[in-house]
Image: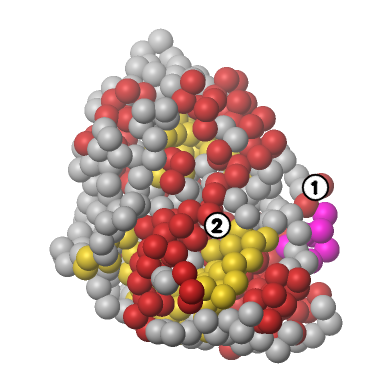
Amino acid sequence: MAKRSVRLFATTAVVALGVAACGGSSSGGGGGSSSTSSAPGVTADSVLIGSTQPLTGIAAPGYSEIAPASEAYFKYVNAHGGINGRKIIFKYLDDAYDPAKTGTLTKQLVLQDKVFAIFEGLGTPTHESVLNFLNQQKVPDLFVASGCLCWNDPTAHPQTFGWLPDYTREGKILGDYVKKNFPGKKIGIFAQGDDFGDNGIKGFEQEIPADQIASVQRYDPGNIKIAPQVTKLKKAGVEVLVSFTVPAFTALLKLTSLQLGFSPQLVVSSVGSDPATLAGLIENFAKEGGTTVKGEDLIQGIVTDGYLPSPADPNNSWIKLFMKVYNKYLAKKYPVFDGNIEYGLASAYTFTEALAAAGQNPTRESLVAAVEANKFAGPNLTPYAYSSDDHSGMTGVQMGVIDGLAIKLQGTPLVTDNGTGGITPYTTAESTAPASGVPSG
């Protein structure tokens, strides 16, 4: 799968990010209100929602699969009668991970297409650029595909909700793992130079003694030349390197480290650790540089975390459901069922739960209220934090290690807050997927 994803993402393409296409969308078309609609985008038989996604550009490898996977789940729901008799139409546009394009396209979705809600807008710097606009327009902004703390501000941004664990929670749990498993080791941090990296570092540093952190280096997602930062990490004697990176920069970090004779233990945020995506990126980047490597071999033993069931677990009820959808709607285009596809399917499931709970004639207000009521029972390994006072998403992760082309989860899921609270095991049994595969209201 990852090899296929990165055909559009050779190093030469990365350098030319500025010319990445901006148009494009999935299926789905118009969908303004009918005379019987309860809200913009809602008709008697359909609900139109929109999104911006990095279908091309720096974040496309792996992430470009997420929206098509969500759309596949909506197709499955529509084939089973929809939600309250309405089909879900999902229109997603390519912003190439460029905030300027995100702004233009989001205004198109809201003002011209008149979507009911924005769903799964992907990226911290991109979605931050439209946060105020969506809330001023009072458009539900559900399940942003980013763990930034900025989505959790119900007073200033009452329409916006996160979905995955925020980066500070994840950083704390990664820090707790490193503290317990690598005592006394010199630690380095390599992070994206925005709220993604800053939030992750904030959580991680709460758990690690300051004198154990030998070097902190940041990268600009528009600059693939990271040898200067990696050289500094090496010179600092880093033995354990914690990475808050998108997949492309995780792959570049691994290859650059090898080129410099630097081989620390890697601990990578879930954002940049999908094994199949990483393996393909490493192979393609190496090929562009004139060498041949086996990407899978180079990612073994990377420590990471997860917040959904492992795609490699065929006995899990959610994986069985998602595989059914994948095989029917996605397998021909995406040969490997990986974590990015699972993400898109799982996030879409949560949206259908919210839409079902919003009532027979959903309004934007009832949709927001349904999320705040937090009666979800999906595939998440830890509970959501949703309430009228908290719009962050899942409350924790489970640690794991890359084994083959899968993440082998270990131990018990852990939960925490995004402040200074402790980290505790979450032992409640995982929910079971409904027999129909479709949530009810």
* Residue at the image point whose x is 38% and y is 77% from the top: 179
Give x and y (percent) for residue 69. Answer: 48, 54
* Residue at the image point whose x is 35% and y is 17% from the top: 38
Give x and y (percent) for residue 263. Answer: 61, 87
Q: Quarter of the image holding residue 139? A: top left
Vertical comparison of 86 with 54: above or below: above
- Main secondary structure found in the magenta portion: helix
How many marks the image carries: the answer is 2
Q: Earlier in the sequence, mark 2 or mark 1?
A: 1
Q: Quick one: quadrant of the C terminus?
A: top left
Badge 2 marks a residue whose secondary structure is helix
| Extent of the magenta region | 9-16
Q: Quarter of the image holding residue 162? A: top left
Give x and y (percent) for residue 120. Answer: 47, 44
Vertical comparison of 219 with 278: above or below: above
Q: Quick one: quadrant of the N terminus?
A: bottom right
Vertical comparison of 385 with 304: above or below: above
Between disc 2 and disc 1, the foreground one is 2
Q: Which amino acid does label 2 sit on?
A: Gly
Toward the top, the furthest residue is: 35
CA separation in Å, label 2 and label 1? 23 Å
Q: What residue is shown with label 2?
A: 197
Badge 1 marks a residue whose secondary structure is helix
* Residue at the image point whose x is 32% and y is 30% from the top: 368
Give the camera-side residue of 174 and 47: 174
Q: What residue is shown with label 1?
A: 18
Q: Are marks 2 and 1 in contact (CB under 8 Å)?
A: no
